[in-house]
Amino acid sequence: MAEQSLLYDEMESPIGCLSIVSTDQGVCTILFGSLESNQVTLNVWLKKHRLPCQLLKDEEAIRPVIAQLQEYFDGKRHSFDVPLDLYGTPFQKRVWQALQTISYGETRSYKEIAQHIGAPKAVRAIGGANNQNPIPIIIPCHRVIGSNGAMVGYGGGLEKKEWLLSIEGAYEKIS
């Protein structure tokens, strides 16, 4: 049986280039930056999850994802309904599902997420799962802040997190 390829495309966004990668089931990762600049990191992630490293550019397949992301950046979309194909541990997937319940314009603390998933002492593990979120923006890990309201880590950098929260109107509530 021939190895299946993953489909990808890139988009320019207000926070820079985004690379979107999808399986037949749905989006499996969004990377900050070009595919070329993320190639080593992406290959490690693909091998870890036993996904094919063969990537085919397919604008048509990725177009609905780019359209929804553009609508989000334009302030016209508050939630996403593109199919996702998540790869992670069962704990990570529980955290990522919890992140998807945080409404547009709202924030939650790591502690609140830990309580939401029934693991109140797992605050640090929540941070680790948040950090490993393979589909930022669509799975809104940018909406998680410190218990004291502080901006804490974001894979794309704090300036991107602040920008995303600002377009949602949430940054003003916490700053």
Image (cartoon, rainbow, N blue to C red):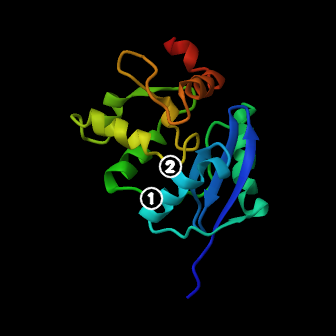
**Residue behind mark 2:** 134
Residue 170 sits in which quadrant?
top right
Q: Could you tell me the amino acid type at mark 1?
A: Tyr
The residue that appears at 75% across and 63% down in the rendered structure is: 58
Q: Position of residue 153 (x, y in %)?
A: 45, 29
Q: Could you tell me the amino acid type at mark 2?
A: Pro
Q: Position of residue 73 (x, y in %)?
A: 71, 34
Assess disc 1: are there few (<14), some (14-19) or many (≥20) residues with their C-alpha within 10 Å of its C-alpha.
Answer: some
Name the outermost residue toward the left: 121
Sequence-earlier tag: 1 or 2 = 1
The N terminus, quarter of image? bottom right
The residue that appears at 31% across and 29% down in the rendered structure is: 111
Q: Are the residues flagged by discs 1 and 2 in contact, CB closer than 8 Å?
A: yes
The residue closer to the viewer here, 131 or 111, is 131
**Residue behind mark 1:** 87
The residue closer to the viewer here, 152 or 74, is 152
